[in-house]
Amino acid sequence: MGTWNADLHINGAPMDGIEMGDGFMNAIGGSVPMKKYVKNDNEFLDGVQYDEAPHLDERTVTLSFYISGDSIEDFEQNKAAFYAGSIEFAVPSRSAAVYRMKYIDGAQYGQSRNGCFARFQAKFIEPNPADRMAR
């Protein structure tokens, strides 16, 4: 199973049947790109003036999960949590942050022969990395 045994919450609910996969915490806690600085290249002033308040840009992140179920139907129900479009991830045992993301695509997928277990890598966009406060 996953390298982290912390409690993963998806859309505010603790998840049974979905665990964080390898590198999950590294990926979700990774760096956030900055937007281009706004600058003023005024002809009447020396040099260039830059906005002193830089802003964060959206980021794309790939997260790994282990999905399981007691039956194929249970497994499919757990897997369907990713197809909600907008998804909130939280790991309360590690941080108070709530990561608000949008599902883009499944990057990799491998399912067991019995149909009740899979390793799933999914791509997400985090539109506003500054918006991680719990609501």
Image (spheres, rainbow, N blue to C red):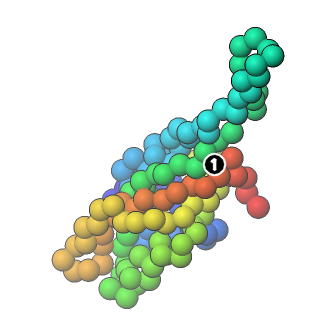
Pointer 1 residue: 129
Residue 60 is at least partly visible in this image: yes
Residue 7 or residue 122, whichever sits in front = 122
Q: Residue furthest top?
A: 46
The residue shown at (36%, 50%) is 22
Drawn side of residue 52 relative to residue 77, left or right: right
The residue shown at (71%, 29%) is 39
Type of the residue with mark 1:
Pro
Q: Position of residue 8 (x, y in %)?
A: 53, 61
Q: Position of residue 31 (x, y in %)?
A: 53, 38
Residue 86 or residue 91, whichever sits in front = 86
Drawn side of residue 72 relative to residue 94, left or right: left
Q: Quadrant of residue 120?
A: bottom left
Q: Quadrant of residue 86?
A: bottom right
Q: Is residue 78 above or below residue 90?
A: below
Q: Position of residue 42 (x, y in %)?
A: 77, 22
Quadrant (top left/top right/bottom left/bottom right) for the N terminus: bottom left
Find numbered disc 1 in the image and state the secondary structure of the residue it sits on: loop
Drawn side of residue 99 relative to residue 130, left or right: left
Q: Residue furthest front?
A: 43
Residue 50 is at least partly visible in this image: no
The residue shown at (39%, 47%) is 23
Residue 48 or residue 121, whichever sits in front = 48
Q: Is residue 37 above or below residue 88?
A: above
The residue shown at (33%, 61%) is 107
Q: Quadrant of residue 65?
A: bottom left
Q: Position of residue 21 (x, y in %)?
A: 38, 56
Question: For the residue carrying disc 1, how many other residues have a C-alpha within 10 Å: few (<14), some (14-19), or many (20+)?
Answer: some
Quadrant (top left/top right/bottom left/bottom right) for the C terminus: bottom right
